[in-house]
């Protein structure tokens, strides 16, 4: 479910939503890692000034997880 929420948020803030791809994996610590692939022109839009946008998205996902104590890591790939 979080993957779909993340895709929806990202597609709403970029200029070229068709290029957004999100893959999901679990790291060695059991954290959920979302790898975000976007066009070069949209990477800056996703990261935001000083990383504020991507940090805000991460805070939102963690808040939506609520008491499940899941930790989400977001990685933006060009």
Image (cartoon, rainbow, N blue to C red):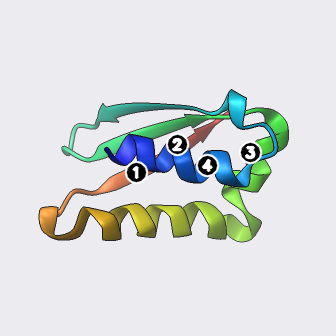
Residue at horizontal 64%, vertical 33%?
Answer: 20
Asked whether the residues under the numbered discs 4 and 3 touch, taking CB atoms below 8 Å apart as contact, a structural biologist would say no
Quarter assignment of residue 27: top left
Estimate the x, y position of residue 14 in percent, counting from the top left: 75, 48
Per the image, the residue denoted by label 2 is 7
Label 2 vs label 1: CA separation?
14 Å
For the residues labelled 2 and 4, say whether their Cβ atoms are less than 8 Å apart. Answer: yes
For the residues labelled 3 and 1, say whether their Cβ atoms are less than 8 Å apart: no
Q: Which mark is residue 73?
A: 1
- Label 1 or label 4, whichever comes before in sequence order: 4
Q: Give me the C-alpha separation between circle 1 and circle 4.
A: 15 Å
From the viewer's side, name the closer residue of 13 and 53.
13
Judge left or right: residue 10 versus residue 49. Answer: left
Q: Residue at x 70, y 29 (%)?
A: 18
- Residue 63 location in percent, x, y? 33, 71
Query: Element type at marker 2?
Result: helix
Q: Residue at x 76, y 54 (%)?
A: 45
Label placed on residue 43: 3
Residue 33: horizontal and vertical position, in percent?
37, 41
At x 32% / y 65%, what residue is drawn? 64
Q: Position of residue 5 (x, y in %)?
A: 44, 50
Question: Residue 67 falls in which quadrant of the image?
Answer: bottom left
Residue sitting nearer the eye, 29 or 54 = 54
Kindly report which numbered mark, 3 or 2, lies closer to the viewer in this rendering. 2
Secondary-structure class at tag 1: strand
52 above or below 17? Answer: below
Judging by the rendered image, the residue that carries numbered circle 4 is 10
> In the picture, which quadrant includes the C terminus?
top right
How far apart are the two marked residues, 4 and 3, measured between alpha carbons? Answer: 10 Å
Q: What secondary structure is found at the residue carrying circle 3?
A: helix
């Amino acid at each position: 479910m979080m993957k779909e929420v993340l895709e929806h948020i990202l597609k709403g803030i970029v200029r070229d939503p068709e290029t957004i791809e999100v893959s999901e994996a679990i790291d060695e610590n059991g954290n959920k890692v979302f790898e975000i692939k976007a066009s070069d022109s949209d990477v800056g839009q996703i990261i935001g000034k000083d990383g504020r946008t991507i940090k805000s998205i991460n805070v939102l996902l963690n808040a939506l997880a609520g008491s499940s104590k899941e930790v989400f890591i977001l990685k933006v790939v060009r």
